[in-house]
């Protein structure tokens, strides 16, 4: 009789472990897929950015023309490539990305194109010096 109880308990525990392993594997696969999709953004030249691109993720490179950080911790920047400039905003959670950037720094910004008060801007998520 004790062998039957052991067998039932062993089977119940085995099923629990199997379910836990499958769940962890699925979480891992979803995480890897999400990270992989994030990196498929190609650099975009500033003159090619238009209002129709609002909502798209881009990478834009240029020279920092101005930078200020508001009391709330939001960083505002102007990035130029010679003939064109675009405003970039890094909110408090991402401002660490541009803390070491200053006027004249070459910088690539990865972010989302938005229209704010009729003006195109990039809401930055990442910066690459």
Image: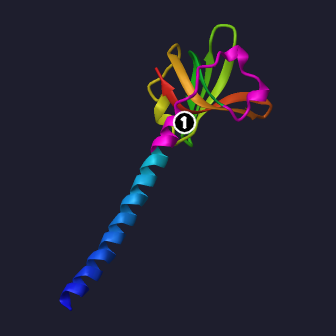
* Residue in view at x 74 percent, y 32 percent: 54
Q: In the shown orientation, is residue 17 left or right of residue 99?
A: left
Task: Give above or below for 123 relative to 80.
Answer: below
Figure coloring: rainbow
Q: What stretch is highlighted in magenta?
A: 32-56
Looking at the image, which is closer to me, 59 or 105? 59
Farthest residue toward the bottom?
1
The N terminus - image quarter:
bottom left
Which quadrant of the view contains residue 32?
A: top left
Q: Is residue 34 on the magenta stretch?
A: yes
Outermost residue on the top side: it is 82
Observer-nearest of 47 and 23:
23
* Image quadrant assignment for residue 119: top right
Disc 1 target residue: 37
89 falls in the magenta region:
no
Residue drawn at x 36%, y 64% is 18
């Amino acid at each position: 009789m004790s062998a039957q109880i052991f067998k039932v308990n062993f089977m119940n525990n085995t099923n629990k472990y199997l379910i836990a392993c499958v769940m962890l594997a699925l979480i891992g696969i979803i995480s890897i897929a999400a990270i992989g999709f994030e990196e498929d953004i190609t650099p975009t030249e500033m003159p090619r950015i238009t209002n129709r691109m609002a909502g798209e993720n881009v990478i834009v490179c240029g020279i920092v023309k101005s930078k200020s950080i508001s009391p709330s911790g939001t960083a505002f920047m102007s990035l130029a490539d010679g003939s064109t400039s675009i405003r970039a905003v890094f909110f408090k959670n991402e401002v660490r990305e541009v803390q070491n950037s200053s006027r004249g720094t070459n910088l690539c910004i990865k972010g989302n194109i938005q229209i704010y008060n009729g003006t195109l801007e990039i809401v930055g998520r990442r910066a690459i010096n």
